Image (cartoon, helix red, strand yellow):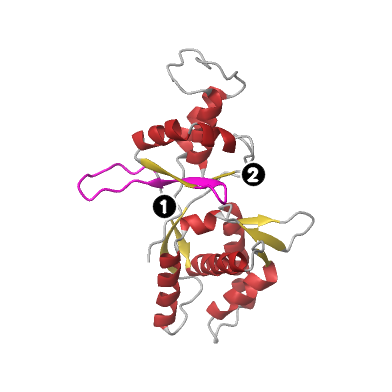
């Protein structure tokens, strides 16, 4: 199965960052600038390109700019064959690659394969989000809970428990790296599941992935890779 967490284009974003650093929010923000957008609007586009999302909680200064200039941001992204996805309730936004059956469109966003443990963890976290929404609670998980869930993916005959534990930790580290898990303050073992995950994985995709695991019957070895798209992310606050 192929579930997309699409990766922003760092090279394009880096050019924006380099050109707009330490400048004012007036027209012509750097020597020879021919751009028409305001500086803060450009920073919104940079954050969306860096990915995986623009989050009002983490990028509090950029969210109102996105709301104000949504039409302009969407238009610029369309010129790069990217679509803007916004969840106003969760106050998160991200880009998605535009696809067309009639046209051969260039692809700006890249994909990286996930291991089975990576995708199994994302399935678990997505389900936890659904449960927390039903109970009107924050989706919080511990390292132990994630490890216990992933333990079912270890072969019964496997004896290298240390190696498997390292693979589990790597899957957790990847979720943090992709900004899908946020470490809670004053704790090393508890995380909040980012609401972005609900946008990146639809309920239909999650059901299909869970069904594919059940149909397999036997659990594949932990080092096998699932054909799932994932992105690197850039940690940080406002661009």
- Badge number at residue 53: none
Q: Position of residue 59 (x, y in %)?
A: 62, 40
As drawn, is 106 to the left or to the right of 8?
Answer: left
Q: Main secondary structure of the magenta part?
A: loop
Residue 180 position by quadrant: bottom right
Residue at 58% x, 58% y is 175
Q: Position of residue 221 (x, y in %)?
A: 48, 76
> Which range of residues does the magenta coloring cover?
87-108
Q: Which residue is mark 1?
A: 111
Q: Earlier in the sequence, mark 2 or mark 1?
A: 2
Q: Nearer the viewer, mark 2 or mark 1?
A: 2
As drawn, is 46 to the left or to the right of 24?
Answer: left
Question: Is residue 95 shown in magenta?
Answer: yes
Residue at 55% x, 47% y is 92
Question: Is residue 35 shown in magenta?
Answer: no
**Quadrant location, the C terminus:** top right
Q: Position of residue 30 (x, y in %)?
A: 52, 16
Q: Position of residue 98 (x, y in %)?
A: 34, 46
Residue at 63% x, 65% y is 169
* Secondary element type, mark 2: loop
Residue at 56% x, 32% y is 65
- Badge number at residue 58: 2
């Amino acid at each position: 199965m192929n579930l997309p967490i699409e990766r922003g284009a760092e090279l394009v974003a880096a050019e924006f960052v380099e050109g707009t650093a330490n400048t004012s929010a007036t027209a012509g923000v750097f020597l020879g600038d021919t751009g028409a957008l305001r500086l803060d609007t450009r920073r919104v586009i940079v954050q969306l390109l860096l990915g995986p999302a623009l989050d009002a909680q983490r990028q509090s200064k950029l969210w109102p700019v996105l709301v104000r200039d949504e039409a302009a941001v969407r238009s610029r992204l369309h010129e790069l064959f990217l679509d803007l996805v916004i969840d106003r309730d969760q106050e998160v936004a991200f880009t998605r690659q535009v696809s067309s059956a009639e046209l051969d469109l260039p692809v700006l966003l890249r994909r990286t394969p996930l291991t089975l443990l990576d995708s199994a963890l994302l399935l678990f976290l997505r389900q936890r989000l659904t449960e927390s929404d039903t109970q009107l609670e924050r989706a919080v998980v511990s390292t132990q809970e994630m490890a216990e869930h992933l333990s079912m993916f270890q072969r019964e005959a496997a004896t290298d428990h240390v190696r498997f534990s390292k693979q589990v930790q790597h899957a957790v580290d990847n979720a943090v790296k992709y900004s899908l898990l946020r470490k809670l303050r004053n704790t090393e073992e508890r995380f909040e599941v980012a609401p972005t995950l609900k946008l990146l994985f639809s309920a239909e995709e999650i059901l299909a992935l869970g069904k594919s695991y059940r149909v397999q019957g036997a659990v594949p070895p932990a080092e096998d890779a699932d054909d799932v798209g994932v992105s690197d992310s850039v940690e940080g606050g406002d661009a």
